[in-house]
Image (tube, rainbow, N blue to C red):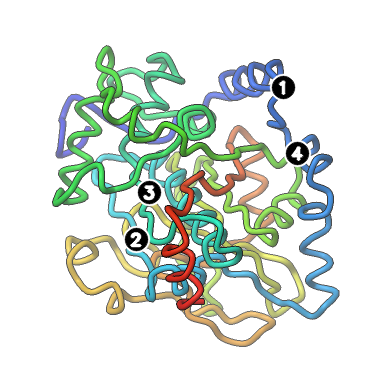
């Protein structure tokens, strides 16, 4: 149960048969939904990217640093109240990939903030066809299909509305038999994203090195970080987050950066202040890695790559996402971006 709606529990649902069904459906229509197929079509930008960077002496790729180019500061961690982690993890992935594209090639509209709510309802209804009932949340494969088929909307869809209120609205329309409002579908139309399934840990590393964030889910929450800012698995709890970076630890092993979808945990237990305090004041994890010391973006922590990947392989999910198609309005947008970069 949750405090917003005592009759509606939400979170990530582990459903490997449904994931396989989504992959089969998308493959049948010609989507490059499997990582091997996508990599074959994008050899120059993806396969072997992380190893090539390591060979050049790169020790870390931290995708959320592009937020500093796009907005001048880090974006706020999500603070879900009702377990809407699938939509939050996917929204973080889409947002991060968009920030990378905006910062790196100036081809997309600057300062778009992605909204999680339509992703949640689209995943449950239009893509999931109400597989998830009143006591369930959403399947990440359906969220990946939602942003690929329907697109994503900006937070301007809810002007002047708090994060908690947006979540309340999302829960209302996510209830079985409800459905995504037509205005939300219209707001997302055209802003579609590449989504594909990385089958190997090495391909996951390549995705992050190439600028594709990777929303993921498995059966454990993130544990408390060690002295180096790297977490292992925590207690049992099906949950969705997003990989947003890859780095070499102090022992020469490649690890991952994970962005929470539940407040600023594990930097601290989530509180109301996460939504109200200046983002610059939110406590952050200090990562100690092969490149030295680095403060990660708010809500992020290093995680043990092999341990988290093992859980993903045991009934979990991971979906690489590209930037949504928010085109620049004109020369003025491009000029503003060039002045920031």
Q: Position of residue 244 (x, y in %)?
A: 55, 59
Q: Do the residues labelled 4 and 2 touch (CB within 8 Å)?
A: no
Q: Earlier in the sequence, mark 1 or mark 4?
A: 1
Q: Do the residues labelled 2 and 1 touch (CB within 8 Å)?
A: no
Local crowd size for mark 4, using a 10 Å CA cut-off: few (<14), some (14–19), many (≥20): some
Distance Cα–Cα, label 3 vs label 2 = 13 Å
Q: Is residue 30 above or below residue 114?
A: above
- The residue at the point 21 percent across, 42 percent down is 166
Q: Where is residue 129 in the image (x, y as percent from the top left)?
A: 42, 14
Q: What element carries label 4?
A: helix
Q: Earlier in the sequence, mark 3 or mark 2?
A: 2
Distance Cα–Cα, label 2 vs label 1 = 35 Å
Q: Which of marks 2 and 1 is nearer the N terminus?
A: 1
Q: Is mark 3 on a helix, strand or loop?
A: loop
Q: Which of the numbered marks, if any, corresponds to residue 77? A: 2
Q: Is mark 2 on a helix, strand or loop?
A: loop
Q: In this view, does 66 lie above or below 194?
A: below
Residue under circle 1?
A: 30
Residue under circle 3?
A: 114
Distance Cα–Cα, label 3 vs label 1 = 27 Å
Residue under circle 4?
A: 38
């Amino acid at each position: 149960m949750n405090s917003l709606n005592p009759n509606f529990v939400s979170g990530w649902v582990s459903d490997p048969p449904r994931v396989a069904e989504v992959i089969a459906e998308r493959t049948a229509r010609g989507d490059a939904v499997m990582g091997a197929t996508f990599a074959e079509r994008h050899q120059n930008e993806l396969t072997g990217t992380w190893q090539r960077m390591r060979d050049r002496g790169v020790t870390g790729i931290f995708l959320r640093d592009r937020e500093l180019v796009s907005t001048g500061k880090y974006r706020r961690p999500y603070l879900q109240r009702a377990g809407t982690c699938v939509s939050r993890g996917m929204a973080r992935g889409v947002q991060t990939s968009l920030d990378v594209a905006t910062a790196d090639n100036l081809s997309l509209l600057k300062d778009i903030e992605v909204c999680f709510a339509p992703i949640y309802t689209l995943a449950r209804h239009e893509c999931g066809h109400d597989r998830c009932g009143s006591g369930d949340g959403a399947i990440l494969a359906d969220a990946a299909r939602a942003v690929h088929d329907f697109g994503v909307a900006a937070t301007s869809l809810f002007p002047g509305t708090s994060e908690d209120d947006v979540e309340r609205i999302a829960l209302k329309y996510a209830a079985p038999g409800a459905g995504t409002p037509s205005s939300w579908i219209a707001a997302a139309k055209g802003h579609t994203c590449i989504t594909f399934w990385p089958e190997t840990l090495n391909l996951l590393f390549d995705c992050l090195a190439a600028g594709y964030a990777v929303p993921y889910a498995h059966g454990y929450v993130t544990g408390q970080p060690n002295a180096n800012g790297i977490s292992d698995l925590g207690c049992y709890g099906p949950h969705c987050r997003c990989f947003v970076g890859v780095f070499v630890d102090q022992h020469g092993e490649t690890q991952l950066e994970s962005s929470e979808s539940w407040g600023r945990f594990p930097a601290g237990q989530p509180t109301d202040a996460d939504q109200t305090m200046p983002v610059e004041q939110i406590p952050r994890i200090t990562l100690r890695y092969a490149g030295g010391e680095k403060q990660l973006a708010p809500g992020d922590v290093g995680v043990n790559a092999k341990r988290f990947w093992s859980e993903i392989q045991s009934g979990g999910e991971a979906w690489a996402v590209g930037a949504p198609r928010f085109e620049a309005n004109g020369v003025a947008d491009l000029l503003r971006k060039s002045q920031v970069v």
